[in-house]
Amino acid sequence: MSNRAMERNILLVFTSPRKNGNTSVIAQAFCDGAQSRGAVVHRIDIGGKPIRGCLECYACCQDHQGCVQKDSLWDIYANFHLYDAVVFAGPVFFGGLPAQMKAFIDRLFSLYPGGGSKDSALLMTAEGGEETGLGGMSNLEAARLGYQTALHYIQWNIQGIVIATHLKSYEDALRCEARREAYELGRRMGG
Ligand SMILES: Cc1cc2nc3c(=O)[nH]c(=O)nc-3n(C[C@H](O)[C@H](O)[C@H](O)COP(=O)(O)O)c2cc1C
């Protein structure tokens, strides 16, 4: 088998509206790690795109032709079989997943069953920390659980979750420990 055939193909779904914000630092660290092991990372930016959520029409269940919404997600889903892993990157919004990430995940419904199992990971950034949530609960728990629950339904394998916290500035993102964690996760998933 040639090296090319053994490369891991990773889809990075970048969902921050800020292309060069905090999440981009963590996402780039992941890409660097994965590429250092020879993986090919295909990055798509959907943070600023007008993407609608699932219409709950169930047409995909009846005709098995995928989602009826022929937008930018359609093109991505059409090539889904090419990817070994799908990694999500985005900011924590009100304790949960940002809307574009949730829309992408919800619309995976149109691929299942039949979409195949994938490895996956979650990369997030937050201004606060675990301690700043409602009534003493973690500020980040809803984001983590939202992702874990969705992946449980579609039966993907979670390879890691990295959340960079206490980021008041871009410089904080550059020097945070999570950046190194994201790099290591990339190395692990890329090899
Ligand atoms: C609408 C909105 C909601 C946010 N909610 C939270 C939150 O619940 N917890 C938190 O720690 N930070 C929250 N933040 C801050 C962002 O998650 C944080 O600044 C993140 O690193 C931004 O990433 P970016 O620079 O890639 O956009 C929020 C920011 C916005 C705009």
Image: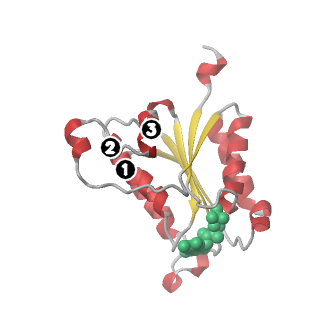
Q: Nearer the viewer, mark 3 or mark 1?
A: 3
Q: Position of residue 88 (x, y in %)?
A: 54, 51
Place of residue 169 in the rendered image (x, y in percent of width and height, measured from the top left): 75, 70
Query: SS for tag 3?
Result: helix
- Quadrant containing ligand 1 reads bottom right
Q: Is residue 188 above or below residue 139?
A: above
Nearest to N terminus: mark 2 or mark 1:
2
Of the image marks 2 and 3, the number of the one nearer the N terminus: 2
Q: Residue at x 49, y 30 (%)?
A: 82
Q: Are marks 2 and 1 in contact (CB under 8 Å)?
A: yes
Mark 2 secondary-structure assignment: loop
Task: State the residue at coordinates (80%, 62%).
Answer: 175
What residue did someone put label 3 on?
Answer: 75
Front tag of 2 and 1:
2
Q: Nearer the viewer, residue 96 or 70?
A: 70
User: At which x and y percent is residue 186?
Assistant: 66, 44
Give residue 107's mark: 1
Query: Disc 2 marks which amino acid?
Result: Cys
Asked if 148 appears above or below 94 in the picture, the reply is above
Which of 119 and 110 lies nearest the eye of the viewer? 110
Tell me the distance, in whole angstroms, between the alpha carbons under discs 2 and 3. 11 Å
The reply to whether residue 37 is in sight is yes
Numbered label tally: 3
